[in-house]
Image: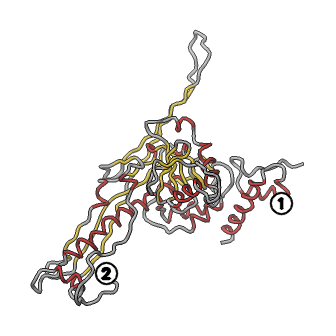
Amino acid sequence: MAIAGTQLDIRGKAIEPILEEVLFANKTIADGYVTFNTDIKAGTIFTEANVDVTAQAYTGSALSSAGSMTINDRIITPTKLEYKQTFLQEALRAGRFGRSMNPGAFNIESSEFGSTVLAQYAPNISQDAENIFWGGITSATKTAIAALTPGAGQLAITAATQTAVASLTAGLVDGVFAKALYDQSAVGQYIKVTGTTVTSANIAAEMAKIYAVIPPENLADTVSPTAIYCPRAWRQLARIANNSVGAAQQVNFEFDSMAADAKCFYNGVEMLFVPTPNNLMAYAQRKAAVSWNTDLLDDVNRFEVGKLVNDGDVQFVRTIYTLAANVGQATKGVLYGG
Amino acid sequence: MDKFVNPFEMGVNYEHFLKALGAKTIKTYCKGKLTDEQIEWLINDLKHYKLNKNK
């Protein structure tokens, strides 16, 4: 792929800072929004264990066994993804980047291009990885969800969500929301809260619906606290809900500072703003139950630049990483708009 | 009188509900059984259901 865009031959000066695109930082990794399992090359077994106990009246005689112990294994194999682009820096020789090329016709590598344009590669990959982790869906899962018979009750997907899923672009990995909706060849076992279009006027009421059905034992877990994973756009709605023009001051949501990226809580449960597949869904779950599974976490920040062949100047830039999203203890997760 | 099929009950899907609904409107069938908010939500979701089914 050639370097595209509009370039001018350099005449006189060029303004030094190059206006770079603004990207979301991958806060899922940077701030530890979920659990990370690394060093996974291929199939790795994840186990969930449940024990149910039943009290019986003491008789002094031998009792029948009561209660149950359940163990569920599943194999997670992260999908290996690669990004690659090729480019020829000869295209930059006449423009601003030509100034940072070493003398000599052989030399067409621009250090300025490397430090400003190529340097954007890694943050873009990291952002894309986060998008995939939360919002990715495979065509197989899309087809399976489209084939479900919807319903309004628990353990059934709503028709509106089916429509929303149908409009998503299929990718290579099922993200957290896809896993919550459909997992192990069946509709997800999530606690459903039927959703609507969330606005600044109803976000507090909708959040109350989510909060009300979070299993109390999950809320009581301080080791791995429950978070509500919400669309990024909801941060603004929460701020507006707290500060409606002309209304009495409301504190529906608690922010830990006035900063734009302040932590946000609803009744003590942290709302984490992530790239959900759309602005219609949110998921409340313990951080321990949502996992990012990969070989090496840092792979998303690593890229390699080199020459395609020794007797040519076309270069490549590539990144390779592996990723699988997993949602455990699905029956304790609350899916808004599920 | 036929038993009301509550679409919000676990195990009831839209096929079951529409069969029970017959020729009645959702509003008539659900009046007094579901809240206004639930009825409104249901009408909207069933629009999606019918559209998805006809695709």
Which residue is identified by label 1? B22
Q: Could you tell me residue A125's position as x and y percent?
A: 34, 65
Name the quadrant of the C terminus of chain A: bottom right
Is residue A239 shown left or right of residue A122?
A: right
Question: Which residue is nearer to you in this view: A205 or A149?
Answer: A205
Question: Which residue is nearer to you in this view: A116 or A300?
Answer: A116
What is the chain identity of the residue bearing mark 1? B
Which residue is identified by label 2? A1
Residue at horizontal 46 percent and vertical 53 percent from the top? A258
Is residue A79 shown left or right of residue A271?
A: left
Question: Dot 1: what SS?
Answer: loop
Question: Which residue is nearer to you in this view: A314 or A20?
Answer: A20
Q: Can see residue A203?
A: yes
Query: Looking at the image, is mark 2 or mark 1 nearer the viewer?
Result: 2
What is the chain identity of the residue bearing mark 2? A
- Number of numbered discs overlaid on the protein picture: 2
Q: Can see residue A338?
A: no
Q: Could you tell me residue A91's position as x and y percent?
A: 24, 86
Looking at numbered disc 2 in the image, what kind of residue is underneath it? Met
- Whether A320 is drawn above or below A211: the answer is below
Q: CA distance from mark 2 to mark 1?
A: 59 Å
